[in-house]
Amino acid sequence: MNAPSNTLNIYLNDIGNHDLLTKADEVELAEQIRLGKEASERMEAGEYRDLQELKRLERSTKKGLRAKERFILSNLRLVVSVAKKYPVPGSLSLEDLIQEGNIGLEHAVEKFDGRKGFKFSTYGTFWIRQAINRLIDQHSNLIRIPADTHSALRRQLREADVSSPELSQEMRRINALTRVASLDVPIDTDGGKDMHAVVPSLDPSPDDLVNEWHNQELVTRALNKMKPKVREMVRYRFGLDDGVEKTFREIGDLVGVSAESARRAVSKALASIAADKSLDPAS
């Protein structure tokens, strides 16, 4: 890795001036952020009785924004710590990884619920890694592979049995797609066909767009039938919010249950969906 630039050194020195948060600080700030967000939504919707209540909502909103700023500043070192563990692609710099990780950090701070009892560092690392992984995926391959496919591949590699190092057929296919090769190199024995002839268009057809819309409608209907906590676990499992599929252990850490409890809850929800006639695509 290249030596840090002067700008990066200044940045690292600056973020070191912000005190780390205790667990109690995290809970308090997360609650202020939540209340501030609720107050902002109420103001936008005009849900207040009089001027006095409006002023209270404004104070709560500002307090929430200050809490969010402090929460983020106190965890910038976490982003640097995560980013430094990645090999930096030639088209990127460590500063790029840190900047993208900061975006993931902000998203994590907005979604963190301190009432669930786990530390922010565990929760925030997921979002920071997700943001950095997406950036690297976008710059590492000449052929664009969807983020959810990269996420699924990383998850399978984490869960793979070390005694079975052979790649699955799907992993071999992805590996072949991401290997750098000239489009002009013949791909058959007589040299009559090259990559230009077989690479399909990435533009969706009208039928693809209609099917995607229909599938999204079915997913929304299925999720609305679940209890909130189960719905959250299903969304994490299949990466419905950010395209990052999570293991049951990761889901358990995020929602405060064991990995086995998360697995049972998701399996039961999927079985219920399969048995629900109203969710039949043909209905």
Image: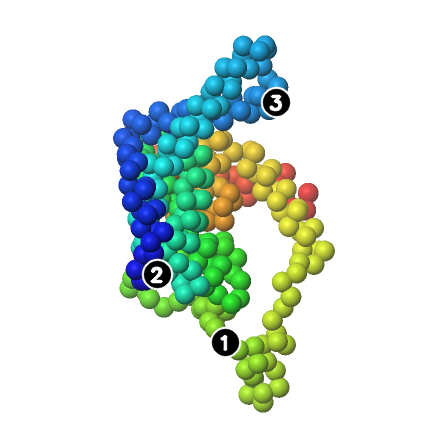
Residue bearing mark 3: 45
Q: CA distance from mark 3 to mark 1?
A: 54 Å
For image coordinates 66% across by 58% down, the residue present is 204
Residue 50, percent from left and from top? 59, 10
Numbered mark located on residue 160 in the image? none
Asked whether disc 3 touches disc 2, contact meaning CB atoms under 8 Å apart, the reply is: no
Res 96 quadrant in image: bottom left
Which image quadrant: the C terminus? top right
First along the sequence among labels 3 and 2: 3
Query: Tag 3: residue type?
Result: Ala
Q: Residues within 10 Å of mark 3 (few under 14, many from 20)?
A: few
For image coordinates 62% across by 19% down, the residue present is 46
Res 260 visible: no
Asked whether, in this view, residue 125 is left or right of residue 209, the answer is: left
Residue bearing mark 2: 87
Q: Examine the rendered structure and indicate whether residue 194 appears above or below residue 39.
A: below
Q: CA distance from mark 2 to mark 1?
A: 22 Å
Query: Tag 1: residue type?
Result: Ala
For image coordinates 50% across by 15% down, the residue present is 56
First along the sequence among labels 2 and 1: 2
In front of the other: 231 or 242: 242
Residue bearing mark 1: 181
Q: Examine the rendered structure and indicate whether residue 253 appears above or below residue 56.
A: below
